[in-house]
């Protein structure tokens, strides 16, 4: 999914100076952003108070939206660089096309994982006809320097491993959890899991104390470490936890996001992750003037123009909290 903000700001992210090295309970408030004609997303990362969680650098939650009489998701071809996109649905379908020739329909609780590497472009749209409801999350994972120029590719995994406890089923999206591992390719120590809780459930989820974590609420009424989380909100949890208490008053859906704190400082703008203002500037020029990001074939419409860069250079700053 694209960042469609026409006033996209440069963000400095990463570096351990932004990591909380102990358990905390920091509730993040989303920013509401329009995505196309009929979809509004709640943006949790990057957030004014929190830029990354492990290598997770971007989190949008959308829906559930009734799109029976609407076009639904319509995101024209746009570029990505230096990151992976993770598409995750609870309701609806998304048709993915990209410049390496992928054409896949992503359905609920199937993993759509696109690794942009040095350069890729893609589009996302609700199929015609499409289901009545659309509900999901779109997330980005920053690629470390050793892998950020890999060849672009797309993975679609239908069968994902699960971890179960009374009242809880955790589906592995990316990385590892309690001995289960996702088939999706990860380039840093990371975890992403979809948590389905039944009404009245109380469970303790095992965690890695070296990871930092956050929980995104997708639906229902739940408490995370005693803190109520409402759909569309995210609770940042810091590091140093070996387990996470969960409680559900109703059937609830959560997403666990975590990973080893991202050592490198990055510059993120629009749909690019780089290491300097100059690198971002060159990527924008390449999308506007060259064929570096390839062509998305089969999409009925024009590709997305790049917004203007904000004035003045921006470099990753020191790791000061």
Image: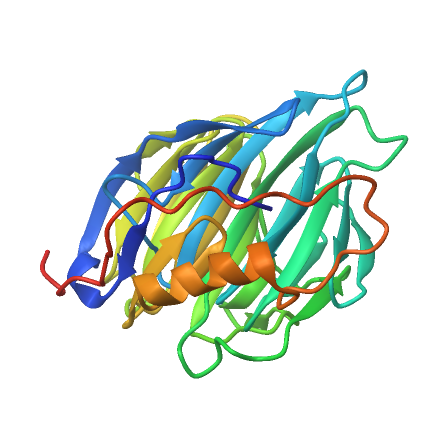
Please tell me which residue is depicted at 71% across the width and 48% down the height of the picture. 123
Q: Residue furthest top?
A: 69
Q: Pinpoint residue 223: horizontal percent, then vertical percent.
A: 38, 34
Residue projecting furthest to the front: 289
Q: Is residue 55 above or below residue 23?
A: below
Task: Determine whether, in the image, residue 96 is placed left or right of residue 204.
Answer: right
Q: Nearer the viewer, residue 18 or 189?
A: 18
Residue occupying image coordinates x 52% and y 50%: 139
Which quadrant: the C terminus?
bottom left
Q: Is residue 206 shown to the viewer in this render?
A: no
**Residue 60 horizontal/vertical position (percent):** 50, 40
Whether residue 176 is situated above or below residue 193 in the rendered picture: below
Residue farthest along the left direction in this orientation: 320
The image quadrant that residue 159 belongs to is bottom right
Measured from the top left, where is residue 316 in percent x and y? 22, 63
Horizontal side of 300 relative to 170 (left or right) equals: right
In-front residue for pair 199/265: 265
Say left or right for 169 vs 241. right
Question: Of 135 and 114, which appears nearest the observer?
Answer: 114
Is 7 or 321 nearer to us in this picture?
Answer: 7
For the image shown, how many numbered marks are present on the structure? 0
Residue 221 in view, yes or no: yes
């Amino acid at each position: 999914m694209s960042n469609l903000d026409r006033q996209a700001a440069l963000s400095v992210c990463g570096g351990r100076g932004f990591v909380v090295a102990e358990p905390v309970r920091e509730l993040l408030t989303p920013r509401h952003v329009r995505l196309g004609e009929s979809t509004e997303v709640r943006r949790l990362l990057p957030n004014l108070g929190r830029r990354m969680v492990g290598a997770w650098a971007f989190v949008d939650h959308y829906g559930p939206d009734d799109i029976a009489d609407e076009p639904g998701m319509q995101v024209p071809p746009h570029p990505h660089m230096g990151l992976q996109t993770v598409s995750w649905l609870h309701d609806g379908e998304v048709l993915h096309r990209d410049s390496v020739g992928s054409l896949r329909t992503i359905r609920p609780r199937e993993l759509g994982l696109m690794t942009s590497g040095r350069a890729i472009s893609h589009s996302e749209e609700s199929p015609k006809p499409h289901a009545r409801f659309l509900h999901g999350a779109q997330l980005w994972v920053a690629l470390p320097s050793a892998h950020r120029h890999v060849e672009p590719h797309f993975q679609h995994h239908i069968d994902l491993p699960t971890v179960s406890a009374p009242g809880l089923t955790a589906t592995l999206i990316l990385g590892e959890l309690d001995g289960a591992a996702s088939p999706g390719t990860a380039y840093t120590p990371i975890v992403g899991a979809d948590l389905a809780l039944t009404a009245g459930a109380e469970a303790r989820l095992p965690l890695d104390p070296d990871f930092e974590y956050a929980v995104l609420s997708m639906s229902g009424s739940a408490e995370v470490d005693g803190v109520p989380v409402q759909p569309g909100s995210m609770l940042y949890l810091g590091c140093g936890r070996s387990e996470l208490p969960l409680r559900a008053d109703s059937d609830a859906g959560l997403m666990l996001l975590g990973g080893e704190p991202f050592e490198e400082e990055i510059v993120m703008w629009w749909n690019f992750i780089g290491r300097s203002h100059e690198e971002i500037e060159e990527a924008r020029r390449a999308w506007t003037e060259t064929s570096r990001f390839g062509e998305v074939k089969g999409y009925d419409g024009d590709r997305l123009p790049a917004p203007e860069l904000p004035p003045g250079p921006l470099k990753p700053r020191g790791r000061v909290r």
